[in-house]
Image (cartoon, rainbow, N blue to C red):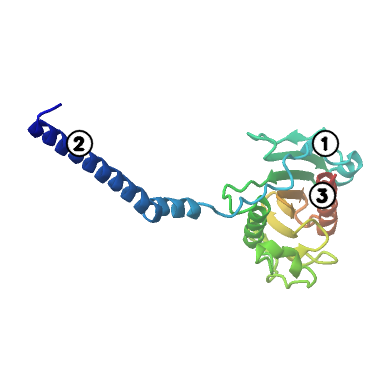
């Protein structure tokens, strides 16, 4: 048996140790408890704040058709007559699933005839914007740049197609290398306008340029199908400076070619 003094000293030591342990446990419990409504809760709020709406879905189209083989041979022979090679010349691109194109050159009694088609699969790099919405915005920008009436807002370009918009002032340009739309063709004339029977939005632009080498007409049809933008350019050069290239024929060809490309995308 320990002497009384030693025993009391040991008891006081044990009591002090027990007290220290209790205080440590209490402090730990206090820290844990405060974390539930303090830092831990804030972390939970932050994590919850990072939860956003689901990313916009990808576009309908993931690949593009091969452009040089997208048109029927009779179509090419009709609108690009007397071509040296109907296989076409493919455009050089870094990714044919994103951008692709093809060109043909033919000859008519007036002069050379040119056809070029370009396809672009639009991809949005903003997760909150879908590929189709981005394509609609890009289409709207191109329509606005071509001064297409009622081209805004881009997401509903076809809504204004039921009313034939007025064209810009017309005239007969005389200076070389100038461009001016004219209004001589039948139907819609050469005024820039929307088309209501093609894709999710379409427009046509008909521009006549007078050059030293002779008149040159460019007819362009641009249309959107979901997240793909398609451009058709059908051009005619006239060696006779007194004869304008035929607007009606070129417009008919550009629209028919665009329709065939739309059918290719729809398959």
Dividing the picture into quadrants, the one containing residue 198 is bottom right
* Label 2: which secondary element: helix
Left or right of residue 212, residue 24 in this image: left
Q: Earlier in the sequence, mark 3 or mark 2?
A: 2
Vertical arrangement, residue 200 with respect to residue 14, above or below: below
Q: Nearer the viewer, mark 3 or mark 2?
A: 2
Please tell me which residue is depicted at 13% across the width and 27% down the height of the picture: 2
Q: Position of residue 50 (x, y in %)?
A: 49, 52
Q: Position of residue 130 (x, y in %)?
A: 64, 52
Q: Residues within 10 Å of mark 2 (few under 14, many from 20)?
A: few
| Residue highlighted by disc 3 | 262
Q: Compare marks 1 and 3 and give the one earlier in the sequence.
A: 1
Disc on res. 194:
none
Give the class, few, some or many, for how many residues have Cα within 10 Å of label 3's Cα (few <14, many ≥20). Answer: some
Residue position marked by numbered label 1 in the rendering: 69
| Furthest residue toward left | 5
Instruction: Specify few, some or many for label 1: CA neighbours under 10 Å numbering under 14, 14-19, or 20 or more.
Output: few
Q: CA distance from mark 1 to mark 3?
A: 14 Å
On the rendered structure, is 84 left or right of 8? right
- Residue 26 position, x and y percent, is 29, 47
Measured along the vertical axis of the image, is residue 124 above or below residue 102?
Answer: below
Q: Which residue is mark 2?
A: 14
Measured Cα–Cα span from mark 3 to mark 2: 90 Å
Which of the two residues, 174 or 102, is positioned nearer the viewer here? 102
Q: CA distance from mark 2 to mark 1?
A: 94 Å
Residue 51 on image: x %, y %: 53, 52
Which of 22 and 200 lies nearest the eye of the viewer? 22
Q: Is residue 181 visible?
A: no
Which residue occupies the foreground of this view, 17 or 51? 17
């Amino acid at each position: 048996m320990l002497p009384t003094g030693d025993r009391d000293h040991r008891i006081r030591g044990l009591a002090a140790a027990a007290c220290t342990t209790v205080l440590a446990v209490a402090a730990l419990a206090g820290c844990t408890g405060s974390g539930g409504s303090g830092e831990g809760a804030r972390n939970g709020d932050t994590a919850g704040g990072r939860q956003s709406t689901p990313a916009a879905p990808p576009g309908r189209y993931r690949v593009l058709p091969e452009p040089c083989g997208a048109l029927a041979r009779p179509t090419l022979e009709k609108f690009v007559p007397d071509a040296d090679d109907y296989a076409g010349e493919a455009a050089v691109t870094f990714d044919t699933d994103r951008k692709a194109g093809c060109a043909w050159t033919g000859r008519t009694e007036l002069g050379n005839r040119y056809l070029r088609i370009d396809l672009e699969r639009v991809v949005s790099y903003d997760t909150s914007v879908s590929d189709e919405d981005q394509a609609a915005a890009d289409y709207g920008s191109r329509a606005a740049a071509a001064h297409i009436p009622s081209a805004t807002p881009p997401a509903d370009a076809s809504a204004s197609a039921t009313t034939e918009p007025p064209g810009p002032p017309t005239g007969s340009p005389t200076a070389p290398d100038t461009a001016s739309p004219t209004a001589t063709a039948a139907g819609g004339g050469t005024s820039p306008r929307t088309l209501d029977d093609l894709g999710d939005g379409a427009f046509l632009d008909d521009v006549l340029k007078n050059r030293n080498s002779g008149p040159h007409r460019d007819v362009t049809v641009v249309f959107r199908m979901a997240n793909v933008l398609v451009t058709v350019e059908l051009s005619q050069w006239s060696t006779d400076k007194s004869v304008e290239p035929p607007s009606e024929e070129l417009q008919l060809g550009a629209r028919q070619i665009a329709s065939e490309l739309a059918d290719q995308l729809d398959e």
